[in-house]
């Protein structure tokens, strides 16, 4: 039966709009999510969603319909960057190696803490990972910024957390600062004015960056329901910033004016086509492009070459994109060193390092030449 189901899914891959119609009127689906989702499904951006994210979004919408956004941190977040299961030893290689000569103590009450919506096994994995990441961050310059990250948002959605040195710790807090460390090393963020992030997920990286570099203007470009989650989160994080949801604008001049008049602007992927040439100082794609079809990656790269001056990318060194195989094509394999990303010739690679966790990921920086 499983083989038959696999064949059916290859011929007729799952689409989350079909599931959406079943739960659209659920009590936990608020008017804002309803509007954003319907706008996305009816937009050109819907065609850019990979089979993998159609499947994940069915799970994400199921969680939102059952628990609402208040439980995001212990449900939907598992499909973003909250690791409740560690599948491969290689993920730890860099993080463990960094701590070989750095002994640290573990509080049994914290490491054995049962997290909401997590099994005991998942809780143990998550809690121990918090310790490993915390002490890795402590060896970086970005550790000084940890106290700038708000518990109201990093813990405010039923997020799993423990206390280390009397500080509330989540993996999102630590990984966001480790991301900031790499990005800042590559591009010196203080010299920038405008950042665009594609695939921002919960908005964790945006919040961390803006909590440190308060002068920046920021654009988030994403699909649903992530754009809904990050929009709600960042309104809570920055009540004094002008935050604009611009997903329904189809006029180039109007869109650019609204972006210029916003501190944080939210757009759908197809709206990138309306951005002015060299209008963005730095574009970020953190842990997202290795989940896309090759044709979609090239679609974005062409747009980046037009509107951004610099590009930061974090990806798995090698991966097979889940659910990408169908009756007409082979599985989508992405190997950076083998040239599967087809980096444009006018992009100059100025930064390349291994990520601390998972350490089979690459951190890459490019200067885009005209």
Image (cartoon, rainbow, N blue to C red):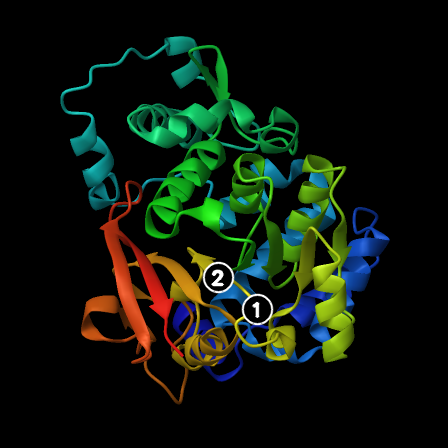
In the displayed structure, would residue 103 be above or below residue 13?
Answer: above
Query: Could you say where residue 34 lies in the image, as x and y percent from the top left?
Result: 80, 60
Residue 83 can be seen, yes or no: no
Query: Could you say where residue 327 lies in the image, as x and y percent from the top left?
Result: 40, 86
Residue at image coords 55%, 29%: 149
220 and 218: which one is in front?
A: 218
Give the SS element for disc 2. Answer: strand
Q: Are marks 1 and 2 in contact (CB under 8 Å)?
A: no
Residue at image coords 58%, 47%: 203
Which label number is shown at residue 283? 2
Quarter of the figure with residue 244: bottom right
288 and 309: which one is in front?
A: 309
Residue 221 can be seen, yes or no: yes
Query: Could you say where residue 364 lies in the image, as x and y percent from the top left?
Result: 31, 58
Residue at image coords 46%, 58%: 284
Locate residue 367 relative to residue 70 in the image: left or right.
left
Which label number is shown at residue 157? none
Residue at image coords 43%, 36%: 177
39 and 241: which one is in front?
A: 241
| The C terminus sits in image quarter | bottom left
The number of callouts visible is 2
In three-dimensional space, the C-alpha distance between marks 1 and 2, rounded to whole angstroms, equals: 11 Å
Locate residue 135 relative to residue 216 in the image: left or right.
left
Q: Residues within 10 Å of mark 1 (few under 14, many from 20)?
A: some
In the displayed structure, would residue 6 be above or below residue 288?
Answer: below
Quarter of the figure with residue 315: bottom left
Query: Badge 1 is on which residue?
Result: 279
| The N terminus sits in image quarter | bottom left
Query: Could you say where residue 107 lies in the image, as x and y percent from the top left?
Result: 37, 10
């Amino acid at each position: 039966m499983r083989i038959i189901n696999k064949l059916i899914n290859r011929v007729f891959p799952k689409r989350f709009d079909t599931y959406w119609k079943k739960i659209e009127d659920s009590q936990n689906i608020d008017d804002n999510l309803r509007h954003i989702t319907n706008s996305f499904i009816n937009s050109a951006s819907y065609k850019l969603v990979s089979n993998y994210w159609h499947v994940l979004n069915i799970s994400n919408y199921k969680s939102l319909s059952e628990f609402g956004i208040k439980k995001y941190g212990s449900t939907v977040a598992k499909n973003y960057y909250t690791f409740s299961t560690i599948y491969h030893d290689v993920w730890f290689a860099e993080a463990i190696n960094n701590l070989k000569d750095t002994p640290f103590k573990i509080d049994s009450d914290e490491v054995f803490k049962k997290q909401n919506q997590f099994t005991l096994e998942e809780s143990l994995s998550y809690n121990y990972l918090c310790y490993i990441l915390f002490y890795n961050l402590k060896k970086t310059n970005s550790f000084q910024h940890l106290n700038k990250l708000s518990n109201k948002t990093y813990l405010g959605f039923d997020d799993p957390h423990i206390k280390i040195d009397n500080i509330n710790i989540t993996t999102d807090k630590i990984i966001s600062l480790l991301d900031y460390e790499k990005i800042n090393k590559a591009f010196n963020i203080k010299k920038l004015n405008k950042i665009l992030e594609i695939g921002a997920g919960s908005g964790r990286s945006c919040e961390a960056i803006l909590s440190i570099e308060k002068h920046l203007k920021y654009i988030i470009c994403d699909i649903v329901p992530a754009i809904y989650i990050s929009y709600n989160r960042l309104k809570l994080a920055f009540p004094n910033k002008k935050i604009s949801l611009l997903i329904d604008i189809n006029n180039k001049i109007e869109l650019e004016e609204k972006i210029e008049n916003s501190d944080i602007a939210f757009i759908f992927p197809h709206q990138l086509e309306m951005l002015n040439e060299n209008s963005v100082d730095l574009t970020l794609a953190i842990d997202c492009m290795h989940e896309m079809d090759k044709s979609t990656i090239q679609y974005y790269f062409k747009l980046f070459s037009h509107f951004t001056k610099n590009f930061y990318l974090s990806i798995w060194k090698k991966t097979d994109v889940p659910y990408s195989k169908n009756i007409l094509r082979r599985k989508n394999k992405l190997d950076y060193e083998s040239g599967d990303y087809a980096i444009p010739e006018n992009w100059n690679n100025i930064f390349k390092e291994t990520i601390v966790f998972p350490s089979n990921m690459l951190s890459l920086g490019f200067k885009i030449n005209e």
